[in-house]
Image (cartoon, helix red, strand yellow):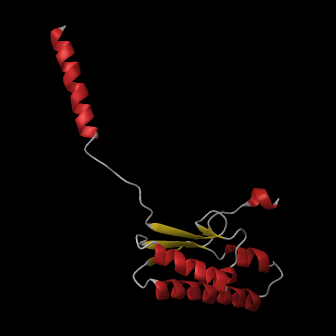
Amino acid sequence: MRKILLLTLFNLCFVQFSSAQCDETAEDKILLMGDSSPTLSVNGARTEDFLTPTKMTEIENTLIANPQFKAVHLSIGGNDVLGSWTVDFTTEQSDSLKSKVYDRIVSIIDFIHGVRPEIQVIWSGYMYPNFEEVI
């Protein structure tokens, strides 16, 4: 009985000290930007929404105020296509839309790099298809 008590006490002390050695603090390292759920979000956003003077100022202020951000996760572009493209589009119209969206995304990325040249930008496209809300 004495050995069991001593072993139990030893195990409790070991678990206490082994788990108490890591003091972790959460720190945001990625700025989420885009449609619906991200930090800098605009519900139903299109790429041009992020090129307005107001939004660009918000992006700039956020990047400057948060030097701990190492990356920007950019989730936009889907609403441009969902809101503009139709099955009746010709190949030329589809290519034109794709080109315009691409150019605006590059402009947004260039602006971000103009504010913080060292920051990594990850463009994932549209974050998720939200069929529930639109139905």
Coordinates of residue 116 in the picture (x, y in percent): 44, 83
Q: How many marks?
A: 0
Quadrant placement of the N terminus: top left
Is 71 on the left or on the right of 48, as rendered?
A: left
- Relative to 20, residue 26 above or below: below
Residue at image location 21% in from the left, 31% down from the top = 14
Q: Quadrant of residue 132?
A: bottom right
Coordinates of residue 89 in the picture (x, y in percent): 80, 84
Q: Which is more toward the observer, 107 or 69?
A: 69
Coordinates of residue 2 in the picture (x, y in percent): 16, 10
Is 7 on the left or on the right of 62, as rendered?
A: left
Is 59 on the left or on the right of 95, as rendered?
A: left
Quadrant placement of the C terminus: bottom right
Q: Which is more toward the observer, 123 or 94?
A: 123
Residue at image location 66% in from the left, 81% down from the top = 47
In the rendered image, is residue 110 in sight? yes
Residue at image location 53% in from the left, 87% down from the top = 111
Q: Quadrant of residue 66?
A: bottom left
- Relative to 27, residue 3 above or below: above
Q: Which is more toward the observer, 111 or 59?
A: 59
Residue that sits furthest to the top in the current view: 1
In the rendered image, is residue 85 in sight? no
Q: Quadrant of residue 91?
A: bottom right
Coordinates of residue 34 in the picture (x, y in percent): 62, 71
